[in-house]
Image (spheres, grey):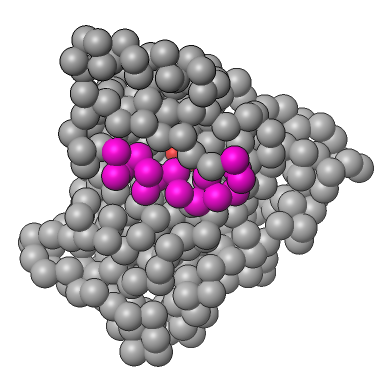
């Protein structure tokens, strides 16, 4: 696979596309893959040179660890030397799905993935296309795919193949077009190495869901979404458009701010989101991208209520609104 800027293959979601994606992974290349969360920039997680290509395409600091995606729990156990009872419980309840588990690494995990840490983040994605690629890649290669979001470090995550092409089409070998991501925001991350286990990043698998699965094992602590994160690579400003993002708890406050903008001749775009919070999550990054494309000075966003996936949407929006 070429290291130089060049043509990005656009692969279809069919047998030939999955074969080609698998060949690129085997050859140490990079291919953006659809998942239920966001599009991931995939490379062979056991190949240091391939993993380095992810960091350079994204311009991501090398100390920021990557999630390894695998086909099933057995493959996950291979990468951990302490896949403990918390990890087993959460994996059997929520995998395949939008949940990442932080566990002690095994010697099979290379330092480039973890930034030298003794822990590794693992996930079994539910997206059918991603699953097919994982299955094919475990027949002919390592079966382990590192796949952070397929966008430039710190910017808005991609939820369509078009988003990937416009962000990094000249920096990667291919993108497999699997349509829109159904969840639309990144996976929940649970640190299974601490007692009690802790949610490091909110997502579609909510605190309540994790707690109900762990009722015999312990309680889950959670991060204040506006506070410092314990997870490396989760700086406060993230998921950020170019325009300044301003957040509002209710429509009245947003409407009166719009009036002020008009009076002061300040350009703005407004995102009201959706009452249906799952739909809001699914469309969040497209809405932010569309608003940003209008090149307003400010993007005004109505926050969802902090209920179920609303907590994770608010987390992303607070980070999108943080100074950068
Ligand atoms: P993403 O960039 O969406 O793929 O998410 C990767 C995030 O997972 C990182 O930024 C970390 O916050 C977290 N993560 C991955 N691996 C580790 C690890 N070994 N230790 C702690 N956090 C991790
Ligand atoms: Mg990301």
Label count reads 0
Q: Residue at x 64, y 29 (%)?
A: 306
Q: Residue 3 lies in what quarter of the image?
A: bottom left
* Image quadrant where one finds the C terminus: top left
| Residue 15 magenta | no
| Residue 279 magenta | yes
- In-front residue for pair 270/12: 270
- In-front residue for pair 52/201: 201
Q: Is residue 25 left or right of residue 185?
A: left
Residue 141 visible in the current orientation: yes
Q: Is residue 94 left or right of residue 32?
A: right
Asked if residue 23 is positioned above or below residue 260 in the image, the reply reads: below
Q: Residue furthest bottom?
A: 15
Residue 190 visible in the current orientation: no
* Image quadrant where one finds the N terminus: bottom left
Residue 267 on image: x %, y %: 21, 23
Q: Residue at x 59, y 54 (%)?
A: 98
Q: Residue at x 54, y 20 (%)?
A: 249
Span highlighted in magenta in the image: 275-291
Q: Residue 309 lies in what quarter of the image?
A: top right
Q: Residue at x 21, y 41 (%)?
A: 293
- In-front residue for pair 268/212: 268
Residue 292 on image: x %, y %: 25, 37
């Amino acid at each position: 696979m070429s290291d130089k800027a060049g043509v990005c293959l656009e692969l279809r979601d069919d047998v030939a596309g999955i074969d080609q994606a698998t060949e690129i992974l085997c050859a140490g290349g990079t291919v953006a893959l659809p998942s239920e969360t966001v599009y991931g920039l995939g490379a062979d997680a056991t190949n240091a040179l391939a993993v380095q290509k992810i960091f350079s395409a994204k311009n991501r600091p090398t100390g920021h660890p990557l999630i390894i995606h695998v086909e099933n729990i057995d493959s996950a156990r291979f990468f951990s030397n302490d896949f403990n009872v918390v990890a087993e419980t959460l994996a059997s309840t929520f995998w395949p799905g939008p949940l990442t588990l932080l566990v002690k690494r095994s010697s099979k995990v290379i330092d480039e993935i973890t930034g030298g840490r003794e822990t590794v983040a693992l996930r079994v994605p539910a997206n059918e296309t991603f699953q097919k690629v994982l299955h094919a890649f475990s027949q002919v290669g390592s079966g382990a795919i590192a796949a952070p979001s397929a966008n430039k470090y710190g910017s808005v995550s991609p939820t369509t193949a078009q988003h990937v092409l416009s962000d990094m089409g000249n920096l990667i070998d291919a993108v497999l077009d699997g349509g829109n991501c159904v969840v639309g925001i990144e996976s929940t991350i649970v640190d299974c190495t601490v007692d009690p286990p802790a949610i490091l990043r909110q997502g579609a698998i909510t605190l309540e869901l994790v707690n109900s699965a762990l009722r015999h094992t312990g309680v889950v602590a959670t991060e204040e979404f506006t506070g410092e994160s314990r997870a490396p690579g989760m700086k406060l400003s993230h998921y950020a458009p170019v325009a300044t993002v301003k957040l509002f708890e209710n429509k009245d406050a947003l409407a009166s701010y719009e009036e002020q903008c008009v009076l002061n001749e300040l350009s703005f775009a407004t995102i009201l989101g959706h009452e249906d919070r799952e739909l809001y999550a699914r469309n969040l990054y497209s809405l932010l991208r569309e608003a940003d494309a209008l090149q307003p000075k400010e993007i005004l966003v109505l926050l969802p209520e902090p209920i179920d996936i609303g907590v994770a949407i608010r987390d992303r929006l607070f980070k999108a609104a943080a100074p950068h």
